[in-house]
Image: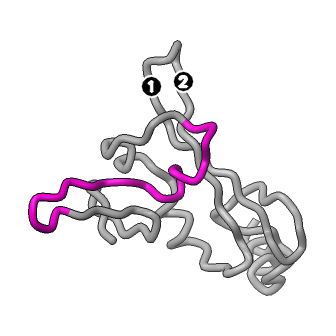
Amino acid sequence: MQTPAGSECPYYYQDFYRGRSTQECRLIGRNPRSEPWESKLCDRCPVPGILRANGCPNMALEAQIVRRWFGLVYRVEVYAVCTEYQVEVDDPYIGCGHCHPQAAMVLEALD
């Protein structure tokens, strides 16, 4: 579904049919430790970019909203895990490096 920021995100949900007014991020809603979600956080959310860059079906995402700069700025932080190899993913834009070795070899050649 298209977010208020204009990007596609499978975790964003909205319903305005027949007077309803529901907007939520289902990825952040799963995390009880997170701060409350607001639609303006979609503007700088990294999740749509991560999903465009890395389509690995073995990567599981978890997100939470944290406060920065003395509690004035809210930000979405993403934590990624490879479910096949049970390792933490350092850079979710690239992946774990085990699932797709061809991609890892191409990226190493570019460095």
Residue 105 on image: x %, y %: 82, 79
Q: Residues within 10 Å of mark 1 (few under 14, many from 20)?
A: few
> Residue flagged by tag 1: what amino acid is it?
Val
Element carrying mark 1: strand
From the image, tell me which residue sits under label 2.
Answer: 68
From the image, tell me which residue sits under label 1.
Answer: 73
Q: Magenta includes 22?
A: yes
Above or below: residue 35 compared with residue 24: above
Q: CA distance from mark 1 to mark 2?
A: 5 Å
Side of 42 relative to 84 (left or right): left
Q: Magenta includes 71?
A: no
| First in residue order: circle 1 vs circle 2 | 2
What residue is at 17 percent from the left and 62 percent from the top? 16
Residue 109 on image: x %, y %: 79, 75
Cβ–Cβ under 8 Å for marks 1 and 2:
yes
Side of 98 relative to 34 (left or right): right
The image quarter containing residue 77 is top right
> Residue flagged by tag 2: what amino acid is it?
Arg
Residue 57 on image: x %, y %: 67, 81
Q: How is the image coloured?
A: one colour
Residue 28 on image: x %, y %: 52, 50
What residue is at 77 percent from the left and 55 percent from the top? 90
Q: Residues within 10 Å of mark 2 (few under 14, many from 20)?
A: few
Above or below: residue 20 compared with residue 1: above
The image quarter containing residue 9 is bottom left
Q: Which residues are magenta?
A: 16-34
**Image mark for residue 11:** none
Q: Residue furthest top?
A: 70
